[in-house]
Image (cartoon, rainbow, N blue to C red):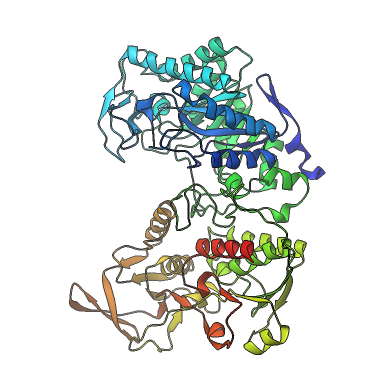
């Protein structure tokens, strides 16, 4: 064990149950469930890998306790005994792999999923969720007590299925959170009003589970430290309610946030100050969660007394073996969650199949399906380009036993992925390259920097197979005036080959690169305007990071002019067409091109023999890192 992190591996109890370490996988939708509301065999592989990777405690994704409370058409259920065989299979797999598992019990209330039930959505009051406006029927006092019974019955099923405990989901805007919230709960019976009465439903669920399952059966409550909505619960409300939960018999408190999943626009550990306030008020263990993606940060949470356990949400998707790597001191081999949300949140992706995965670690979600196996015929393989696609392919191939050489024209690895790490909130992207390099070194990849590869070099080295991961080149359209001296490519800005401050800057292109370049330039004190024929900025960016990006550039004063096509670049601006009208922008000192990228196939085109040559990533088709890394992984497993 790496003694520096020994505290993270000291056992601790939740109730009467002793856990082997302080690492927790919180509840997250795996999308490995079916329309019968059951876990699939891939769900067992997915959860089982995290137990195998060393997590001491795993919470299931939300299990619905009553059919009208379903959030999704494929949400897993625990509202009927027919689910017991599948749930038992899950607990068996976790226990076989050395872990412990709690069932998270949930009801959606007013945020019932569309098309999930013929029954009307219910809630503590008539208020509809402002994000969906679904009609809501207020529960009567007697119906609230039926809901309480449903949670208790679900806990009994969980115990029968072999779960080590349960977690009551009172966060993230679901039914129990709606009761807890002063913004949503407008009741005038004993389940609404003051803090005590708004917490009553959860208190009675805790007491009911303890009475039905025994005091030795652990019960955790997950609640939001702050709801994040105007008029919603504050941390003071959360602390008061947490004290009530403890008094009712809860064995631990799991403190989340109203918005459950945060992108790189939120700092790592953003929720820790709230966690500390709750911990100070309680005697029972507290679980911290909220972009905890670094071993030292995790250690600081425990060592400072901020919490007793650390829940690694997206980080456990990114690297299911995080605890094992920390314990063995393999810190540079950890895949670090960047908060990109590219694959973990938006699971219906370009790849075959469906389910949660990770941009930088496509093996996540492919447990039991993708395996790195030793090759029966070692080959000499040359890879051109040390961006994420090239490096990912390199270490996998080397681990399989191939003789791998990587050539990079620059003095360091990363390619355009390093440029993607330039914006101020995306620094964790650089860690991806560090990890790929560390794995490459471990398995014997030979790196060659500052080498411009040509056909002669490849012929001389006599590779059995060549992989071209040469990336892309900036797209420079034929527009009059594009060769003016004050015209710069976005890559040159992000690469700091050119930078300025206090200027009026016009960015041509409102894709993700253009908007992030505008953000970067505005942070350097420039007044920035972005023009594009697109009807919305950064349209293919994941929704949550995109919303944060647009809010940030608005705060920085960046102006967007959309639905506008550039016709001519002038020395101080452009002529453009908008609504079939010719218009002009003037008064700009600098003009930046961000029209997108095109595949760099110059080396490929120069090769006479292309039989054993593969193109991956942007070199095949300009897209994004998610696609590039996925393609690289598939190819490396097949050669």
Q: Which of 473/631 is in front? A: 631
Q: Which of 108/573 is in front? A: 108
Residue 28 x/y as whole percent: 51, 39
Can the viewer see residue 97 in this picture?
Answer: yes
> In screen coordinates, is 143 left or right of 180?
left
> In screen coordinates, is 243 left or right of 346?
right
Q: In the current view of this chain or complex, which residue is farthest to the front?
A: 376
Residue 256 x/y as whole percent: 52, 35
Asked which quadrant contains residue 402, the reply is: bottom right
Residue 319 x/y as whole percent: 63, 49
Which residue sits at x=60%, y=41%?
Answer: 45
Q: Which of 501/579 is in front? A: 579
Which residue sits at x=46%, y=35%?
Answer: 226
Asked which quadrant contains residue 495, the reply is: bottom right
Residue 265 x/y as whole percent: 49, 53
Can the viewer see residue 308 in this picture?
Answer: no
Which residue sits at x=59%, y=57%?
Answer: 428
Asked which quadrant contains residue 72, the reply is: top left
In this view, 413 is above or below 320: below
Which residue sits at x=45%, y=29%?
Answer: 77
């Amino acid at each position: 064990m790496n003694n520096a992190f020994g505290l993270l591996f000291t056992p601790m109890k939740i109730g009467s149950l002793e856990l082997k370490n302080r690492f927790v996988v919180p509840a997250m939708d795996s999308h490995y469930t079916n329309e019968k509301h059951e876990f699939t065999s891939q769900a067992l592989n997915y959860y089982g890998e995290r137990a195998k990777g060393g997590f001491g405690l795993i919470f299931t994704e939300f299990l619905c306790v009553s059919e009208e409370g379903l959030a999704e058409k494929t949400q897993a259920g625990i509202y009927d005994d027919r689910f017991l065989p599948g749930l038992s299979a899950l607990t068996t797999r976790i226990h076989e792999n050395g872990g412990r598992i709690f069932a998270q019990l949930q009801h959606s209330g007013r945020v019932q999923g569309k098309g999930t039930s013929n029954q009307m959505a219910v809630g503590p009051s008539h208020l509809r969720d402002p994000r969906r406006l679904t009609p809501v029927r207020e529960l009567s006092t007697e119906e609230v007590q039926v809901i309480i019974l449903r949670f208790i019955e679900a806990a009994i099923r969980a115990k029968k299925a072999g779960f080590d405990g349960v977690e009551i989901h009172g966060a993230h805007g679901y039914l129990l959170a709606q009761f807890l919230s002063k913004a949503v709960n407008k009741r005038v019976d004993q389940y609404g009003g003051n803090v005590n009465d708004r917490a009553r439903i959860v208190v009675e669920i805790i007491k009911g589970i303890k009475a039905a399952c025994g005091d030795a059966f652990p019960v955790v409550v997950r609640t939001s430290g702050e709801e994040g909505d105007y008029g919603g619960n504050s941390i003071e409300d959360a602390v008061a309610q947490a004290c009530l939960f403890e008094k009712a018999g809860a064995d631990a408190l799991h403190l989340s946030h109203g918005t459950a999943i945060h992108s790189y626009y939120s700092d790592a550990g953003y929720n820790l100050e709230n966690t500390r306030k709750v911990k100070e008020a309680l005697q029972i263990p507290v679980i911290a969660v909220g972009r905890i993606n670094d071993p030292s940060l995790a250690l600081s949470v425990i060592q400072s007394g901020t919490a007793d356990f650390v829940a690694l949400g997206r980080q456990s998707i990114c690297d299911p073996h995080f605890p094992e790597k920390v314990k063995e001191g393999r810190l540079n081999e950890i895949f670090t969650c960047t908060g990109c949300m590219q694959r973990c949140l938006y699971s219906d992706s370009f790849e075959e199949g469906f389910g949660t995965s990770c941009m930088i670690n496509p093996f996540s979600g492919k447990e039991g399906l993708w395996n790195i196996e030793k090759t029966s015929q070692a080959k000499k393989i040359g890879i051109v380009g040390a961006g994420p696609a090239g490096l990912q392919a390199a270490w996998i191939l080397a681990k399989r036993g191939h003789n791998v050489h990587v050539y990079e024209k620059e003095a360091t690895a990363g390619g355009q992925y390093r440029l993607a790490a330039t914006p101020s909130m995306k620094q964790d992207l650089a860690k991806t390259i560090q990890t790929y390099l560390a794995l490459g070194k471990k398995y014997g990849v030979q790196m060659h920097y500052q080498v411009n590869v040509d056909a002669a070099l490849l012929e001389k080295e006599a590779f059995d197979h060549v992989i071209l991961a040469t990336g892309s080149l900036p797209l420079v359209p034929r527009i009059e005036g594009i060769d003016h001296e004050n015209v710069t490519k976005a890559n040159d800005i992000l690469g700091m080959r050119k930078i300025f401050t206090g200027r009026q800057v016009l960015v041509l292109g409102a894709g993700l690169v253009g908007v992030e370049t505008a953000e970067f330039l505005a942070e350097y004190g420039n007044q920035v305007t972005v023009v594009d024929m697109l009807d919305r900025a950064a349209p293919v960016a994941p929704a949550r990071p995109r919303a944060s990006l647009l809010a940030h550039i608005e705060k920085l004063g960046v102006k967007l002019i959309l639905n506008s096509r550039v016709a001519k670049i002038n020395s101080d601006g452009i002529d453009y067409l908008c609504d079939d009208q010719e218009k002009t922008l003037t008064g700009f000192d600098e003009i930046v091109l961000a029209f997108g990228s095109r595949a760099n196939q110059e080396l490929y085109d120069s090769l006479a023999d292309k039989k054993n040559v593969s193109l991956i990533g942007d070199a095949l088709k300009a897209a994004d890192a998610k696609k590039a890394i996925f393609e690289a992984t598939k190819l490396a497993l097949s050669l």
